[in-house]
Image (cartoon, helix red, strand yellow):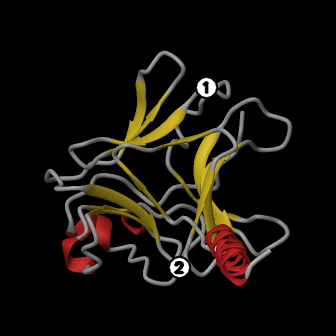
Amino acid sequence: MDALTRLVIIFSSVFFILRISVAVDTITANQIIRHGDTITSAGGSFELGFFSLGNSRNRYLGIWYKKLATGTVVWVANRDIPLTDSSGVLKVTVQGTLVILNGTNTIIWSSDASQSAQNPTAQLLDSGNLVMKNGNDSDPENFLWQSLDYPGNTLLPGMKLGSMVQSNRPGSVPVIMEDH
């Protein structure tokens, strides 16, 4: 084996290893999250995906601490309308809205982005905040939607309980989620 071939193999191996180790923290309009798929914040602290409580068949889209053995859930999108099987998906629409579709492609939950996006991207930040933004615009003032505006029973740094009132979003602080 000549030196050039060895060099190509070494660089290919290193590239492959680096590619595996990079966390995927975004989804775009041409991607979906299915049962078993997750995205992880860049620093590896939080993970987003579908989960069930205990032995229940009900499934929810949520964010949880990835590094804790208990996988403490910190935010749930569809807490009021769970999926009843594993056929649902999370999708980013071309308008810049996050939607959860059930097995019949019916929307059971959506974010309420107030404006359309150019190159919409959903990103899970290291703060545990899931944000909808225009492309690579990481300025929090420009986020189209963010999960921190809809707190669950776990408060994360940066959550503002008054933000629901200040932004005229209906709702109250939710109670601890129980699966019925």
**Tag count in the figure?**
2
**How far across and down, in percent of the image, does residue 120 sit?**
27, 55
User: Which residue in the structure is indicated by mark 1?
Assistant: 87
Residue occupying the point 41% across, 21% down? 106
User: Which residue in the structure is indicated by mark 2?
Assistant: 126
The answer to whether 66 appears left or right of 169 in the picture is right
**How far across and down, in percent of the image, does residue 141 sit?**
20, 78
Q: Residues within 10 Å of mark 1 (few under 14, many from 20)?
A: some
Can you say whether 152 is above or below 32 in the image? below
Alpha carbon separation for disc pair 1 and 2: 28 Å
The answer to whether 16 appears left or right of 110 in the picture is right
Can you say whether 104 is above or below 77 in the image? above
Front residue (pair 144, 36): 36
Residue 147 in view, yes or no:
no
Residue 36 in view, yes or no:
yes
**How far across and down, in percent of the image, does residue 160 sit?**
38, 77
Q: Which mark is residue 100?
A: none
The residue under label 1 is which amino acid type? Ser
